[in-house]
Image (cartoon, rainbow, N blue to C red):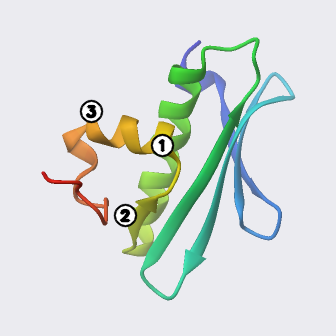
């Protein structure tokens, strides 16, 4: 699947980023905005019919774009999302906690 095949929509009063492909929700990233400068990612859910690593990365790229546009930093309390951040130093400019980096 290609990222260009996915539409990203914010739902649930701005607390969930959804990935939609061919009219079907294939993944969600749950987050909250705290204060004027932070986003906390709490969880991700990916449809089991899709590659979770790929869809999670697309969701993270989308929320990182949002964070950069809003001048916010991201904190992840989700271990899966934190792991993805650890393998992508290009996200360090928005990551609040560097976990020893």
In percent of the image, x 31 and y 59: which residue is there?
95
For label 3, the SS is loop
Residue 75 image position (x, y, % from top left): 42, 63
Name the residue tied to disc 1.
79
Q: Is residue 48 left or right of residue 29?
A: right
Residue 100 image position (x, y, % from top left): 15, 53
Which numbered disc, 1 or 3, marks the residue that appears first in the sequence?
1
Name the residue tied to disc 3.
87
Q: Is residue 60 above or below residue 21?
A: below
Residue 37 image position (x, y, % from top left): 42, 81
Name the residue tied to disc 2.
68
In this view, the residue farthest toward the left is 101
- Relative depth, front residue between 33 and 101: 101
Q: Is residue 97 left or right of residue 7?
A: left
For label 1, the SS is helix
Q: Disc 1 versus disc 3: distance between alpha carbons?
A: 13 Å
């Amino acid at each position: 699947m290609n990222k260009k095949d996915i539409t990203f929509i914010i739902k649930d009063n701005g607390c969930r980023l959804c990935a939609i492909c061919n009219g079907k929700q294939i993944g969600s990233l749950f987050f909250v905005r705290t204060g004027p400068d932070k986003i906390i990612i709490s969880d991700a859910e990916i449809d089991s019919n899709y590659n979770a690593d790929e869809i999670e990365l697309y969701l993270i790229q989308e929320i990182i774009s949002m964070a950069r546009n809003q001048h916010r930093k991201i904190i992840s309390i989700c271990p899966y999302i934190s792991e993805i951040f650890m393998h992508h130093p290009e996200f360090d400019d928005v990551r609040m906690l560097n976990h020893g980096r």
